[in-house]
Image: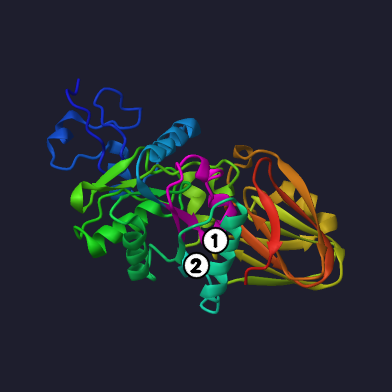
Amino acid sequence: MMEQEIGCEGCGVPLQTEHPEKPGYVPPAALEREHPICKRCFRIRHYNEVAQVEHDPDAYLAMLGEIGNRQALVVQVVDLFDLSGSWIPGIQRHTGGNPILILGNKLDLFPKSAKVQRLKEWVYHTVSELGVKPVDVVLTSAAKGVHFDEVARAIETCREGRDVFVTGTANVGKSTLINRLLKEFGSGEEVITTSPYPGTTLDTIHIPLEGGRELVDMPGIVRRDRMSEWVAPDELGEITPKSEIKPKVYQLNDGQTLFFGGLARMDYSEGVRQPFVCHMANSLYIHRTKLAHADEVWEKHRGELLSPPKDPSSLPPLVRHTFHLDGKQKQDLVISGLGWIATGKERARVELWVPRGVRVEVRPAIL
């Protein structure tokens, strides 16, 4: 038995030496190291292996509730590529009235032609509708270090000498962002384990700041209504954008279908010929076919030509969502955790088929 609880430096979970199959396991000899990390973090860092871990949303919300007992700045990191899907619902109910700074991450995924100010206004408007009046909104790329001086300046200005809690849903890039801050403005070392699989950070990680204050990396809250949470770890890279998106444009007549791998499909049921612009990972295979043949193609090729997933039984059954586009403005059809399809400015009826429970929405076009 360990006499004193020690947290894994990489993911925050308490280390233990008795149960290899549970989170936090570390071989006893490894505890002698200056900065011990659990076996899972070790495998992620050195072999890029990711083991799925069961997450308890209630436990994460309880941790979030602790912020309300402190005088602190809350930094909520959101994924610009999936803003609604990466939002913590009702965050203002858990943070005790502490100020909230919004960091919109993954700006590097957007085309260079995207207007940053317009994106910033979109983020501010969206989070305001969700019930939060942020003290500021900063757009950045933790992976590329874009606008990082502005990020550091906003955190330092808004915290006013208080603790900082960095929150967000799983896989928005919180830990990458903190590592970048440490590397550029702190110790010069990355200490937090990062990976593309949701839920890498399992417990709170505390990083000392001057004056006895601290920066706390909170575990990412797992939202099961995103496509990314349903894809197997070894296939996640195929749907996770890693570089600037190259939109794929399809001029469709009604009676045509687009398959997004074997994960989802879009049926253009009624309307005039118009463009549909797909903003998804460059590596995701998109297949066009006639609506009349769509069911047959889906049944015959899903898991092979249409993949991921290689194992279709790993996903819930598809559910149809019907959208009537008004033709008054360009709109985006959003599939949470996968991307979006920008429509033309024409009246239309479109069906999106996604696994049961995955969130879809229509919004005014953001680009």
Colouring rule applied to residues: rainbow
Residue 86, placed above or below residue 27: below
Question: Along the horizontal axis of the image, is 324 left or right of 193?
Answer: right
Q: Residue at x 44, y 31 (%)?
A: 59
Gap between marks 1 and 2, in whole Å?
8 Å
Which element is circle 2 on?
helix
Residue 50 appears in the picture as rendered: yes
Residue closer to the observer: 226 or 101: 101
Question: Along the horizontal axis of the image, is 104 left or right of 363?
Answer: left
Look at the numbered discs 1 and 2 and tell me whether their residues touch, using CB distance below 8 Å: yes
Q: Which residue is mark 1?
A: 81
What's under tag 1, amino acid-wise? Answer: Phe
> Percent x, y for residue 344?
76, 72
Q: Residues within 10 Å of mark 2 (few under 14, many from 20)?
A: some
Q: Quadrant of the N terminus?
A: top left
Residue 278, placed above or below residue 204: below
What's under tag 2, amino acid-wise? Answer: Leu
User: The magenta stretch spans which residues?
Assistant: 75-104
Question: Along the horizontal axis of the image, is 245 left or right of 99?
Answer: right
Q: Residue at x 59, y 48 (%)?
A: 227
Q: Which residue is mark 2?
A: 109
